[in-house]
Image (cartoon, coloured by chain):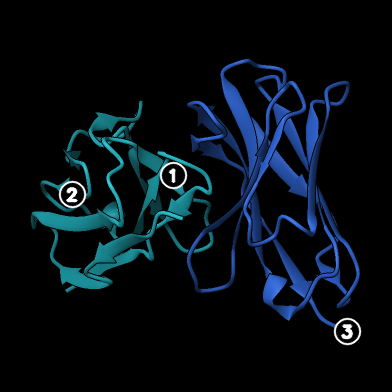
Amino acid sequence: QLQLQESGPGLVKPSETLSLTCTVSGDSITSTSYYWAWIRQPPGKGLEWIGSIYYTGSTFYNPTVKSRVTISGDTSKNQFSLKLKSVIAADTAIYYCARCDRYSGGSCYPDYWGQGTLVTVSS
Amino acid sequence: DIQMTQSPSSLSASVGDRVTITCRASQRITTYLNWYQQKPGKAPKLLIYAASSLQSGVPSRFSGSGSGTDFTLTISSLQPEDFATYFCQQSYSIPLTFGGGTKVDIK
């Protein structure tokens, strides 16, 4: 059974770097059929795709965060990670990792999601 | 970016009602449209992909239709466990974008 689990600090200070890891079980992040994505949701608000990574190492980012974000993968641990630098209060959100059934050019639809982790940006 | 607009933003309905939620894309996306259900404190769950394909394990009372710019999610007979927020998402191009959500609550 596929499971995704986010982990990382729940509190980050403004201007610092948010770092989260998603551990995948029940599938491999080297699968050719999927991207692996990060999506966030400010409390009480809608969903925003942050970016995705493919097993080749190719990454796709939302222009709204592209200058601040890095997504990477660790195939030995079957994990992928998110780093968002220079965070501000508006980056406070529930962060989800997800498996994303892929089309071409980075496009996909998330079919399985982690439970999400709340990250608060505050001093 | 492709903007996704859902309507209504909320609705009240009774168990057994037929419920329809609409999603409109700002440009043509053929059938690259997906629907999710989210309950409080939980991650979104995929219901429908490619506009009308039912995800495995999802009850058949859920159906999707549409192509181009206009799409519909229909719940044929609302059940107590269906009270939730529903989101559409386009997978035509990146950045992936979501609708603002439709909250379905008890009348």
Based on the displayed image, in which of its 4 quarters is residue B85 positioned? bottom left
**From the viewer's perspective, is the residue at label 3 or at label 1 nearer?**
3
Instruction: Tell me if I can see residue A2 in this picture.
Output: no
Residue placed most toward the observer, A101 or A94: A101
Q: Nearer the viewer, mark 2 or mark 1?
A: 2
Residue on which disc 1 sits: B45
Q: Residue at x 77, y 76 (%)?
A: A88
User: Distance from label 2 to label 3 (Cα)?
Assistant: 44 Å
| Residue that numbered label 3 is attached to | A123
Q: Colour of chain B?
A: cyan
Q: In the rendered image of this protein, does residue A37 appear above or below residue A54?
A: below
Residue B79: give x, y in percent of width and height. Answer: 20, 52
Q: Is disc 1 on the same chain as disc 3?
A: no
Tell whether A76 sits left or right of B69: right
In the picture of the structure, the residue carrying the numbered disc 2 is B72
Check disc 2 and report its element: helix, strand or loop: strand
Circle 3 sits in a helix, a strand or a loop, which is it? Answer: loop
Q: Residues within 10 Å of mark 1 (few under 14, many from 20)?
A: some
Amino acid type, label 2: Thr
Q: Chain of mark 2?
A: B
Q: Is residue A38 above or below residue B10?
A: above
Q: Identify the amino acid type marked 3.
A: Ser
Label 1 secondary element: strand
